[in-house]
Image: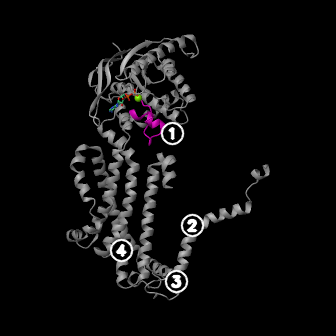
Amino acid sequence: MTSVTDAAPPRPAFRLTRAFHGIERLIVPALLIAGWEAFARSGMLPPALLPAPSAVLHALGDWVFGFDETTQTYSGHWLRDALASALRVFGGFALASLLGILAGVAIGWSRLFEKTLEPTLQMLRPIPPVSWIPLAIIWFGIADKPAIFLVFLGAFFPVLMNSIHGVKTVDHNLVRAGAMMGANQRQMLTDIVLPAALPSIFAGLRIAVGSAWMLTVTAEMVAVKSGLGYVLWDSYYFLRYDIVLAAMISIGLLGYLSDLGLKAIMARTLRWQQTTTVQGRAG
Amino acid sequence: MAAIELRNIVKVFSDKRRGRDLLTLDNINLDIEANDFVCLLGPSGCGKSTLLNIIAGFEQATSGRTLVDGKQVERPGSDRGVVFQQPTLMPWLTAIDNIAFHLKLKGVAKAERYDRAMEFIDLVGLRGFEHHHPSEMSGGMNQRVGIARALLMNPSVILMDEPFAALDAQTKLEMQEELVAIWQKRRCTIVFVTHSVDEALVLGNKIVVMTKRPGRIREAVDFDLPRPRDITSPEFNDAKRHVLALIREESTRLAQAS
Ligand SMILES: Nc1ncnc2c1ncn2[C@@H]1O[C@H](COP(=O)(O)OP(=O)(O)O)[C@@H](O)[C@H]1O
Ligand SMILES: [Mg+2]
């Protein structure tokens, strides 16, 4: 009887599962890519319609480094295109963060702003940002401005909503504690309400940065003549699906990196709650 | 002049959902002398927190006057230190920054803030934890920070609303002993809310027994048993019997009324 309960699990099997753990997450993508490559080479579809992963990688490599001009006018210009998109994302996102936090905190904190400002903003919120494209083009022309405007619209509302929520749900007793220690109205806002609302505000910023990339690319397809979205749409007209896919990969990668950067800033700023939530939930 | 004077305090909450008014405090009159350790004892829902919040300035009485050091209470202020039932610390600040928060609000420079807060870190036995955040400390340690934070303001009165209710029995005993030691050392006025007869008798030198629905003061008992108090001594048990009788009388009254 004792031998049954005391028996250790067989070691080799244990090691195998450990080794398996490291690569298991790569199995599905590897199979997908291998299957895609095999299917593309089988000739069931013309290569122009479904480029193989190797062809996409080739296009991406040439776009970035410009080794054989397979991407023609884009060859070696990836950095310029990515930078153009990134600057629009950054511009719109920065503006949306600034105004979203300001308006959100004002609405969450003051009845006056809640009554005067919030109804208008909440009515504008359900309008899809892309439906502003015609107006944006009329107002701003074909350039950076309409793109930044669209990015702003997409990023503003998540920041706004989460800032309002963060301020409104501040622990009532923290405010009492602040009053007990002699905080005036300004100190109450800057030293208590704002830090207490930060986790929620950051959640809004992370949603916003995703919207920002989506809208930059959308804007570049219609209202701008540069950036990753423009390359994507332009290549579609020339039936270069390898470049289309390379652009999609680039956008995904940059969007992912922006989120990682924001997460790093958040982890630093909210280090105080790291032991309880940041590591536990967002990990 | 008493440290705290409560004159004909009435508090009515209007229950909007049910469309009626709830008389929570009915004509409370009480004088609390400086350096008293007063325990407000009563069943939950009898209005202890409401009364404490009125003294703290968090809530306004419907009628009546509240004076602290002869001045009418109108809003919260650092002359009245409050220790909440939950520690209610700023979670983004370390222990020492929480304790020194009052000084920060007053614009005192960091070096001096820390210098002055260290005395209170030592007083509540948290040396070595001054740079820990609330999420990294136990409930008892956080409550110590809450007490130190109130003491640092050097308030004329300290108001405590069941501050040890959420702690385990062992920690609660330690904290009660420490609180008495601090009170003896610093000579401050404490109003301590509790629903536990034992806690009130261990801590207070005046026990104010409250009754429920509406909240009234049943009796204010002076209780000068020497400290540290032996909870098994005949004198302690006599006092306990007296207080329990007051409470029991009250529950029979309520039972008969309903
Ligand atoms: N903000 C409020 N609005 C309405 N009723 C309240 C409010 N605060 C307390 N009460 C009511 O007043 C009574 C006393 O509450 P409280 O002072 O918290 O009692 P205690 O602290 O003795 O348990 C309770 O019946 C409670 O429901
Ligand atoms: Mg209470």
Q: What kind of secondary structure does the magenta stretch mostly adopt?
A: loop
Tag 2 residue: A25
In-front residue for pair A37/B246: B246
CB at disc 3 and ligand 1 closer than 8 Å? no
Tag 1 residue: B131
Q: Are marks 3 and 2 in contact (CB under 8 Å)?
A: no
Tag 3 residue: A39
Drawn side of residue B182 relative to residue A77, left or right = right
**Both labels 1 and 3 in a single chain:** no
Mark number, residue A229? 4
Q: Amino acid at mark 1?
A: His
Position in image of residue B51 (x %, y %): 35, 24
Position in image of residue A4 (x %, y %): 77, 53
- What span is colored magenta in the figure? B83-102
CB at disc 2 and ligand 2 closer than 8 Å? no
Q: Amino acid at mark 4?
A: Gly
Position in image of residue A230 (x %, y %): 34, 76
Above or below A6: residue B218: above
Q: Nearer the viewer, mark 2 or mark 1?
A: 2
Q: Quadrant of residue B128?
A: top right
**Pointer 3: residues within 10 angstroms few (<14), some, or many (20+)?**
some
Give the alpha-carbon distance from disc 4 to disc 3, as whole Å.
27 Å
Subunit that carries the residue with mark 2: A
Give the alpha-carbon distance from disc 1 to disc 3, as whole Å.
60 Å
Q: Earlier in the sequence, mark 4 or mark 2?
A: 2
Position in image of residue B72 (x %, y %): 28, 21
**Both labels 4 and 3 in a single chain:** yes
Residue located 37% across and 20% down the image:
B257
**Pointer 2: residues within 10 angstroms few (<14), some, or many (20+)?**
few
Question: How many labels were placed on the picture?
Answer: 4
Check disc 4 and report its element: helix, strand or loop. helix
Check disc 3 and report its element: helix, strand or loop. helix
